[in-house]
Image: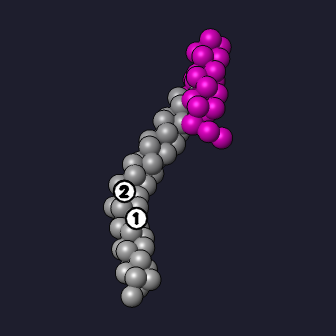
Amino acid sequence: MGDTTDKLKGKAKEVAGAATGDEGLENEGKLDQAKGSLKKAAENLKDKAKEAMGGPADEARREAQKAERTTDRDLDDE
């Protein structure tokens, strides 16, 4: 399940547990919400890591392609 689904499901369980006095259900809901928050944090961290690693790698790839094109033109001119 996605992080939003976990949070919504958890909130529903928490409210239902509180309304019925079922502490187990209420705590289960809080746990589901925490799980949703952790999933979201992990997704954000993964995205930030991709950005951090992708930027320099993409720049290096572009520079390599640019150098290759320049070399190809220089060879064609000979």
Which quarter shows the N terminus? top right
The local secondary structure at tag 1 comes to helix
Q: Amino acid at mark 2?
A: Gly
From the image, tell me which residue sits under label 2: 55
From the image, tell me which residue sits under label 1: 62
Can residue 53 be seen by looking at this rendering?
no
Residue 28 in percent (x, y) is at: 59, 32
Q: Residue furthest top?
A: 19
Q: Which residues are magenta?
A: 1-27
| Quarter location, residue 26 | top right
Q: Amino acid at mark 1?
A: Arg
Residue 11 in percent (x, y) is at: 58, 22
Label 2 to label 1: alpha-carbon separation: 11 Å
Q: Around disc 1, counting alpha carbons within 10 Å, would you say few (fewer than 14), some (14 to 19), or many (20 or more)?
A: few
Can residue 4 be seen by looking at this rendering?
yes
- 3 magenta-colored: yes
The residue at 62%/39% (across/down) is 2
The structure's colour scheme is: one colour
Q: Is residue 36 above or below residue 54?
A: above
Is 71 or 29 nearer to us in this picture? 71
